[in-house]
Image: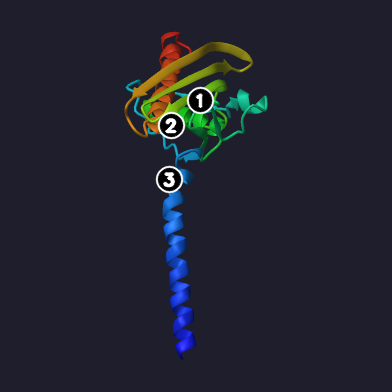
Amino acid sequence: MLRDETTTMNHRQRLRSLTYIAVAFMPLLLSGCLRVIVLEYVPSNPLKGHGAVQVEPFEYVPAQEGSVRPHEVQTNPKGIGKVFLSKEIGLVVRNALAGELRHSGYEVTPDGGMVISGRITRFYLNWVDETEKTFELNIDYTLTAGEQVVYSLTATSTQRAAKVPLAGIGLLNAALKDGLEQFIRGAQEAHAL
């Protein structure tokens, strides 16, 4: 009986020691290296429109060139670490655009007469420390009707946040909203959408 109690006490002491070690090293594990962001984009543009449109998958050029992975945000090599989205970046942008179009009153269909495609050439988060972050976005949009390009635009957006912890997600959302709105507004003003 004494042996069972001693074994149980040793087991508890080991668990307590492991817990202390885990707590001591947790800040090191969480402070750098890898961050995965769930980016849930919520459409909110004030624009209104109508008609059927198809939104093709967007190309994430840096991933196609092999400099990052399809889920990986471009980052400063001297920054806090690598940042990944929970979904592929091309899919995130495509779904955000489809959501904004639906929000504006367009019908997004798999076989719409108008087709929107895009190339993401920059999706860059400069996150060197917790006090200042910059996010840069460049997307080449193309709107076609049949085989004819009726509108194209390179939308760029740079968003900055200073002294706001964990502002990275807000910067990505703000840049994405700005770029999507630039495209929709521009296509509407050109009477292409």
Q: Which residue is the site of mark 2? A: 99
In the displayed structure, 9 sits above or below 169; it is below
Tell me: 103 left or right of 114: left
Residue at far bottom of view: 1
**Alpha-carbon distance for marks 2 and 1?**
12 Å
Residue 101: percent from left, percent from top: 43, 26
Label 3 packing within 10 angstroms: few (<14), some (14-19), many (20+): few
Q: Which mark is residue 53?
A: 1
Amino acid at circle 1: Val
Q: Quadrant of residue 107?
A: top left
Element marked by disc 1: strand
Q: Which residue is the site of mark 3? A: 27
Q: Between residue 4 and residue 103, name the one nearer to us.
A: 4
Element marked by disc 2: helix
In the displayed structure, 155 sits above or below 58; it is above
Residue 11: percent from left, percent from top: 48, 74
Element marked by disc 3: helix
